[in-house]
Amino acid sequence: MSTSSTYLLERAWVDGAVCDDVLVTVADGRFAEVVVESPAGRGFLTLSAVATPNNVSESLTTQSVLRIPGLTLPGLANTHSHAFHRALRGRTQRERGTFWTWREQMYAVAARLEPDSYYDLALATYREMAAAGITGVGEFHYLHYQPDGTPYDDPNAMGRALIQAAHDAGIRIALLDTCYLSSGFGKPPEGVQVRYSDGTAEAWAERVDRLQADGSAVVGAAIHSVRAVPAEQLPTVSDWAQQRPLHVHLSEQVAENDACAAAYGVTPTRLLHDHGVLGPLTSAVHATHLTDDDIATLGETQTFASFCPTTERDLGDGIGPSRRLHEAGSRLTLGSDSHAVIDLFEEMRAVELDERLASQQRGHWSAAELLAAATTDGHSSLGFSDAGAIAKGQRADLVTIDTNTPRTAGTGRDENTAVFAAAAEDVTQVMVDGRVVVRQGDREEIGRQLDAAIGRLWE
Amino acid sequence: MSTSSTYLLERAWVDGAVCDDVLVTVADGRFAEVVVESPAGRGFLTLSAVATPNNVSESLTTQSVLRIPGLTLPGLANTHSHAFHRALRGRTQRERGTFWTWREQMYAVAARLEPDSYYDLALATYREMAAAGITGVGEFHYLHYQPDGTPYDDPNAMGRALIQAAHDAGIRIALLDTCYLSSGFGKPPEGVQVRYSDGTAEAWAERVDRLQADGSAVVGAAIHSVRAVPAEQLPTVSDWAQQRPLHVHLSEQVAENDACAAAYGVTPTRLLHDHGVLGPLTSAVHATHLTDDDIATLGETQTFASFCPTTERDLGDGIGPSRRLHEAGSRLTLGSDSHAVIDLFEEMRAVELDERLASQQRGHWSAAELLAAATTDGHSSLGFSDAGAIAKGQRADLVTIDTNTPRTAGTGRDENTAVFAAAAEDVTQVMVDGRVVVRQGDREEIGRQLDAAIGRLWE
């Protein structure tokens, strides 16, 4: 007989509304029951004593109820992460430059990582994510080989380090193992890129086949970009992916569009579509510089649009057509990508605020829509279609924010507080798959762990 | 004989560089001494015992030294605040709309405030500012009269409430008492605007003359906008201001430019310049939609440009030409304006990040330049030219951030950490004019105070 725990959420986002006094029962990592209205006669809604997890018993009618104050949200999904970019935060702002000069600095870090240091950095980064309310991450992983391009004894040593790091941080991971074969259209891998390349898409598929998923990990696929995988090899990747998530960087930079047009005479979106890459399990990451036809194609194929607005600001990518994509049929998801900041609350509002800058109009996205992007749609795009809602049968993720901090106080304690006022620092407790993985007071240790993991890399 | 205190700053921003082990002596609210290099022989750089403020004695050679860990910055200046807008945070995002529909909601709050509730809300808001490292605020204040337009017994009751609130929060204030006479070009005040209007600029000047400054308060002037003060009355305001700060909303919206062109046949910048408003003690707030000639005029007159990027995102104002203004001769300052967020760290980086979105290039502003905007230049534009630097003779403001939080850890512990990684929540201690006004642990009480002050308004 499995044990269950019952929690009384002071206030929670359930079925598209903020509700008071939500009673949830968790068993085997899922919500066994979610009761929104006060169940008459049971009387536990007036409990003044607060139970601790240690004295929760197994019978619902007699068991203690743990009260969780604040505003509780479903778990947040970070759909686009390069964990190792966390080592660059604050260190790439010193000089003028473009996306392409930034990339040189990023490659310098990529050249240094080994499975142990990759694990340490990813663990600290995923713990920072957990503390920010992120319960699932899509890791766009391309650091496969040793610095000289030869395989590790286990050719998936680097990918396994990431899965282990997510596991040890207490969050779920979709390892989006990335096919990266060329440095540009028709150009072989250069420099550190020898760590990325399997040589052919078939060799990539053979290696990735040896990675196993489990209950908290999905192994999915990624195509780095139309630059990095020759068109004729794209179907090998999409055929391998089949019922798994498949992610691809798409039109982040105008230069990529220009090079694609020169090489193939079409836009990157069209090229991907013509080779069977787009579809309802595919995510187009960034999707910034699109034609009207591109938007229609992404919408018609129900391809997810994974926006990363704080990174797109940082790299000067530009402002993508998030609302037009949504209206065409693409569901929005959100990623912290380069980890210039890890704060899905900021990503949610940044989508709306950047649309305002571009249009000089307010009110493109409602808070409820942005929450859907950061929760249900985000988790679905990572292959966890049973996460992102506080509802019976769903994975038991709970993210609680304090609505009485200097940042959140007086803002209405509703979904607008979450989307337009809160920050990662307002998260007080995080449950993933029924297990509390972050408590108040954990931040200090997470900071020390980040400092140590990153400090070693820059020594 | 005055007492003095000595502090050893583990790391600090002094004279344009991050330095280790900075020894500062504070007397009478100012820095009496700032020693950057380790003074040989004194030995206090190796002190392992940490003194508490209570046992600081008066003799430098024998006194205890209080060690302040972390990265310490000069005090930050918030050059554009409407304190009462804090009550709107999270509450104006529910519907589509423009700047102008947002303004209707803002006016609903403006109609409810009385001196007591204005004081309560401003005190809580200024305490939030203090906790974010803001040591001086420019309050653009236009809520002068009773709801029906008649004066309070003390016609400056509302302005005095703000000065008292800043004093009680422990920060300095430049009360920018705002002349607001018309609802549009040639239109009398409407609705709640009867609270704003003195009738004529002369009556405005007579009222403001009765306000007194002191060591932590400056009484300055503001012209609400070219819409709100008829051109022929502009010189009355600028003549009154003389050696005081004078602020004016400028070209925040395209509609204002269009209406000004229709009424006067010139841009708002040209109109202000032709009536003597621009100059080195004037701040143009927003300065978003400018012609090449406007930029040249603002630069030549050395008018400050007060940018409020988080508000400009929120209201969909657009992205102003911050760098071009700087190159023309206008010094940048920063404000949190509508207080959608109170975080000068975010304002600093938002200037750079929004320029990146507009240009698709990185590296327009260095961290050092953005720190100058948030410190020395900001305080100067408020009439406190002796604040904003950790230097002998300057006002003793110290803002310390924790460089080992999840947000800041591993980011290099330099000015890029402050500008491109930190958030208000990373501030651990704030000193203003030699007095510690915020300590770790104050946030909870500040949150409660905000909740109470705002809750009463919305009852």
Image: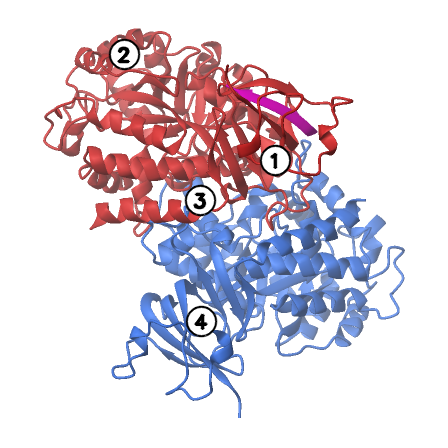
Chain colours: A red, B blue
Element assignment for label 4 = loop
Q: How many residues crowd around disc 4 within 10 Å: few (fewer than 14), some, or many (20 or more)?
A: many
- Image depth: mark 3 or mark 4 in front: 3
Disc 1 designates what residue? A51
Q: Amino acid at mark 2?
A: Val
Q: Is residue A188 magenta?
A: no
> Does A283 appear above or below B341?
above
> Does A247 appear above or below A408?
above
Q: Amino acid at mark 1?
A: Ala
A64 vs B29, nearest the viewer: A64
- On the rendered structure, is A454 left or right of B304? left
A179 vs A286, nearest the viewer: A179
Disc 2 designates what residue? A237
Element assignment for label 3 = loop
Distance between mark 4 and mark 1 Cα atoms:
51 Å
Chain identifier of the residue bearing label 2 in the image: A
B291 vs B17, nearest the viewer: B17
> Does A190 appear above or below B332?
above
